[in-house]
């Protein structure tokens, strides 16, 4: 048996305490580092020496691993719940933006402009030959149509912004996938000898956290090979990456927008990415949602409602107006057209309805050029007659004004129903976002309680390992004194 066993035993305790102190120092240094997981030193007794007739003599201690304190189940829950959290956050913020576009209720809202238009008609009915009253009607038509135009243009602009956001998120997914792939390669190479690349694993987990908010993902690791998939298709397979295709932009011309925009697809195979939740899913729902069937009510839904509103205004009011006569005795013209065209530019009302949309509805060129063309009378040369104006005013409370649309009723009923849909969707998005935020806060708290660095705990460990280090050093000093006596002074007594 070696005479240095006691010395080696003491040295092993000294080195173990030293490494534990280093790890504690590393934890304290990264207490505020995002994504960092507390590291823990695993220590065990070394193999003892067998002493014949006596027993087993301990030989000290060793550090056999340094692990990151991480709960795989909590990570799984975080990644699963982070996607719907991102989706509802996007929907809440965007629906608030759509509410701001409609700006209801306010002094510059649909209902306000519509009321002012009918109020102008009522004023005209009191003195149909007054050019001041006719001018007021013209100005209110211009104000109403411009508000419809601007609202539609803002919705198209929002759709374009959402499409840009989709493109940005796709690029972000591809970038994160590339970074995860690079870390996979580094981690796998460093861990071939059985050690753990703790800090690199933390960096990878942080990237997965970020990715999980954008798209719904599944993560697995087998034999050190890390895999990330989206909707059953592999995004990262160890050191292989299957990228997403960047969707094309929205057509810039708002008068000729794309009603169906490209979905997110895999670069290889051109298959659609099956998105179940996440920021990307929220953006696509808002960009493309038309409310048909189970589809989400997004920007397309509100654009179509505006188009229906514009078409019905053109159809119902023009139908009544064209049956009357102007101040000069001429047959009534259209009051509304598309892009300021005249009645003579169309063969009939159906041709106008095929062309008109919310972005191009306007005052007709006939009324813009000559106020006499406002058809207030039902008979030619009816200078002070107001029968046709009264017919136009009656449309305000006509329950069949919107007769083949969803919703139906008067113009005011239609607008209120659309705004109610928006309010319900916005309220739901807000509540869902609050629920997901509460779930995520609970998961984050649990994750932090297990993986986060507690300064108080680390300070306690520091004191413990410092005492252990000092005790091991004192033991080495003691053994050194024993060896000094044994080697240098043993047998000198009595000489």
Image (cartoon, rainbow, N blue to C red):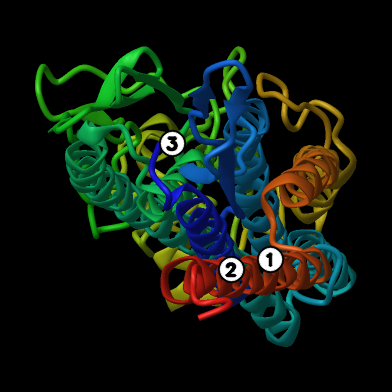
Q: Residue 353's mark?
A: 3
Q: Which residue is mark 1?
A: 465
Which residue is most to the front? 495
Image side of residue 45 versus residue 366, left or right: right
Q: Earlier in the sequence, mark 3 or mark 1?
A: 3
With respect to residue 60, does 72 lie above or below?
above
Q: Identify which residue is drawn at 38% across, 43% down.
A: 2
**Foreground pick, 199 / 4:** 4
Q: Position of residue 433 (x, y in %)?
A: 77, 45
At label 1, counting other C-alpha atoms closer than 10 Å, the crowd grade (few under 14, some 14-19, many 20 or more) is many
| Foreground disc of the pair 3, 2 | 2
SS type, badge 2: helix
At label 3, counting other C-alpha atoms closer than 10 Å, the crowd grade (few under 14, some 14-19, many 20 or more) is some
Q: Are marks 1 and 2 in contact (CB under 8 Å)?
A: yes
Image side of residue 221 versus residue 291, left or right: left
Q: Position of residue 80 (x, y in %)?
A: 60, 28
**Foreground pick, 47 / 97:** 47
With respect to residue 132, does 406 lie above or below?
above
Q: Position of residue 1 (x, y in %)?
A: 40, 36
Image side of residue 405 versus residue 439, left or right: left
Q: Identify which residue is drawn at 57% across, 18% down.
A: 292
Q: Identify which residue is drawn at 24% across, 59% down.
A: 252
């Amino acid at each position: 048996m070696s005479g240095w066993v006691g010395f080696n035993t003491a040295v092993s305790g000294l080195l173990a305490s030293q490494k534990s102190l280093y790890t504690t120092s590393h934890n304290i240094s990264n207490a505020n580092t995002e994504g960092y997981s507390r590291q823990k030193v695993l220590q065990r007794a070394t193999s003892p020496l067998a002493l014949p007739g006596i027993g087993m003599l301990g030989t000290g201690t060793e550090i056999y691993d340094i692990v990151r304190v991480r709960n795989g189940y909590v990570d799984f829950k975080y990644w699963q719940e982070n996607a719907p959290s991102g989706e509802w956050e996007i929907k809440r913020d965007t629906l608030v933006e759509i509410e701001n576009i409609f700006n209801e209720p306010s002094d510059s809202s649909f209902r306000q402009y519509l009321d002012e238009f009918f109020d102008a008609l009522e004023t005209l009915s009191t003195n149909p030959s007054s050019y001041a009253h006719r001018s007021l009607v013209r100005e209110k038509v211009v104000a109403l149509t411009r508000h419809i135009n601007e609202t539609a243009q803002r919705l198209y602009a929002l759709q374009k912004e959402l499409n840009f956001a989709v493109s940005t998120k796709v690029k972000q997914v591809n970038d994160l996938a590339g970074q995860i792939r690079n870390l996979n390669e580094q981690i796998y190479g460093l861990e071939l000898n059985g050690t753990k690349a703790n800090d690199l694993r933390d960096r990878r987990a942080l990237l997965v956290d970020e990715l999980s908010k954008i798209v719904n993902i599944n993560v697995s690791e087998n034999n050190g090979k890390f895999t990330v998939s989206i909707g059953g298709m592999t995004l990262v397979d160890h050191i292989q990456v299957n990228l997403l295709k960047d969707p094309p932009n929205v057509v810039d011309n708002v008068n000729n927008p794309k009603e169906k925009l490209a979905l997110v697809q895999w670069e290889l195979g051109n298959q659609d990415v099956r998105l179940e939740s996440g920021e990307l899913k929220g953006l696509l729902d808002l960009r493309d949602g038309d409310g048909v069937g189970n589809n989400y009510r997004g920007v397309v839904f509100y654009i179509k409602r505006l188009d229906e509103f514009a078409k019905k205004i053109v159809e119902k009011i023009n139908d009544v107006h064209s049956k009357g006569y102007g101040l000069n005795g001429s047959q009534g013209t259209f009051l509304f057209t598309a892009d300021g065209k005249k009645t003579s530019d169309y063969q009939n009302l159906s041709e106008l309805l095929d062309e008109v949309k919310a972005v191009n509805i306007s005052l007709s060129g006939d009324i813009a050029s000559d106020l006499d063309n406002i058809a207030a009378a039902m008979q030619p040369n009816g200078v002070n007659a107001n029968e046709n104006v009264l017919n136009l005013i009656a449309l305000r409370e006509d329950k069949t004004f919107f007769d083949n649309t969803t919703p139906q009723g008067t113009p005011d009923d239609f607008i209120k129903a659309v705004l109610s849909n928006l309010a319900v969707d916005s309220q739901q998005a807000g509540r869902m976002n609050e629920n997901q935020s509460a779930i995520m806060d609970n998961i984050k708290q649990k994750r932090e309680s297990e993986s986060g660095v507690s300064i108080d705990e680390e300070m306690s460990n520091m004191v413990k390992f410092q005492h252990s280090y000092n005790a091991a050093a004192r033991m080495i000093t003691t053994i050194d004194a024993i060896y000094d006596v044994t080697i240098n002074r043993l047998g000198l007594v009595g000489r």
